[in-house]
Image: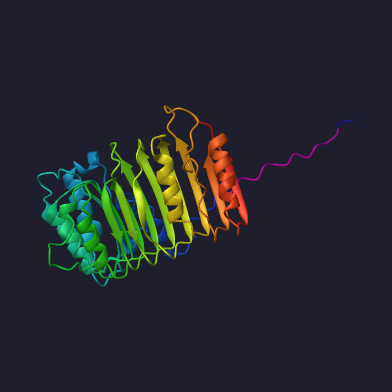
Amino acid sequence: METSQTHTKCKPQIKTDRLSSLHESLLIVILSFLPSRYAVRTSVLSRRFQHLWKASPSVNLSFSKATFKESTSYVAMANSVLLSRQPSDPPLLRLHLFVPSQLPDDIPPEFISSLLAHAHSLGLRHLTLDGYGDHELILHSVFSVTSLQSLSLPINSCELIFPSEGTATTLTRLKSLSLDLNPVKSAQVERLLSELCCLEHLQLSIVAGMLTVSSSTVKKLELLIIITMDDPGSVLRLCMPSLEFLYLESRGTSQHLPHIHGDIPLLRKSVITLRNLRSNNVNAAIAQFLKFISHAEELSLDLKEHWFEDYPFDILLESGKEAPVFPNLKHLHARMCFHEHNFKAVISLLRQSPDLQSVKLVHKGML
């Protein structure tokens, strides 16, 4: 007797176009995260996407060096996505430009300046300038965009970026500033910061030396110090009465860390990352810095000795001296090699922190 079996056919899967179901405003946000040359290509997807990229609040012309050599394509793209925009179009909030050290012959600095001037007329708020192009005309154009609220400017010639002596900066609305400075001219940095009356967030990448960073308005400071040579005389002075958050990182062979001092009475949180620490004078510099930030409520330490050095050695405290008192410290996070010297130093630090609520210790080996 044969048994009949019921064979069920697999139902074909229906492909759903979820992208088209998204609201137009959300699609525009997605397009704003793409480099402009890719956002423009979405115009071939459908009629709905044909002009959608034009409403993006961002223009990203961050071409690579190789692509930038195709100057005709770069100019065409700049004309299409930026220079063709009108004040009646959706506002331009963000502009990302790449400026190489050597511009092609058919892309003079005046063309880049014209992009900045047009972006200014559209109410540009956030500008990122990539590359290391020290083109004086371009950099002066940057400091003429009075509508800016944030500026990221990696350059390697401090003399060219600041307004001339006796001329006040026009960036009075700037709230966030990121500078990659090499070399550093302390007087020029001081003058610039003193004129940025609304600045709240400051990122600095500097080579170790003699520098004063002073601002009455900055609440968040991210500082990257490049140590390129054995210079025991490096001094960093921080005069920031409103500072609440400090991130400090050092790179290079840190045989002599800068002497850091100043006035930061409102500091609440500090994140410290130090690499390649050497035994010579490092513990004195770190101990002094811990005293400088001893009123913080949150402290994160990420410390690593140089693997060529005699091991182990104390990187936290000076020999024969006690740890600084942390009267307000509530949260401590420490990543380091907890050999005998460092373990004793951390125990001493914990004993000097009467208000401590949480501790996280992460051991990491030398390699």
The answer to which quarter of the image holds residue 100 is top left
Q: Relative to the observer, which residue lies in front, 147 or 262?
A: 262
The quadrant of the image that shows the N terminus is top right
Q: Is residue 285 above or below residue 202?
A: above
Q: Relative to the observer, which residue lies in front, 78 or 164?
A: 164
Q: Is residue 9 magenta?
A: yes
The answer to which quarter of the image holds residue 177 is bottom left
Q: Residue furthest right?
A: 1
Q: Position of residue 102 (x, y in %)?
A: 15, 43
Q: Does any portion of residue 211 appear in the rendered image? A: yes
Q: Is residue 230 above or below residue 134?
A: above
Residue 259 placement, left or right of 107: right
Q: Position of residue 362 (x, y in %)?
A: 57, 41
Q: Position of residue 70 (x, y in %)?
A: 19, 42
Q: Relative to the observer, which residue lies in front, 278 or 334?
A: 278
Q: How does the figure colour the protein chain or chains?
A: rainbow
Q: Relative to the observer, which residue lies in front, 52 or 184?
A: 184
Q: Is residue 37 above or below residue 94?
A: above
* Residue at the spot 83% in from the left edge and 36% down from the top edge: 4
Q: Residue furthest bottom?
A: 88
Main SS class of the magenta portion in the image: loop
* Residue at the spot 20% in from the left edge and 53% down from the top edge: 185
Q: Position of residue 157 (x, y in %)?
A: 18, 49
Residue 94 placement, left or right of 360: left
Q: What range of the chain is rendered magenta?
A: 3-14
Q: Is residue 218 magenta?
A: no
* Residue at the spot 42% in from the left edge and 27% down from the top edge: 308
* Residue at the spot 29% in from the left edge and 70% down from the top edge: 197
Total marks in image = 0
Q: Does any portion of residue 153 appear in the rendered image? A: no
Residue 92 placement, left or right of 312: left
Residue 169 placement, left or right of 330: left
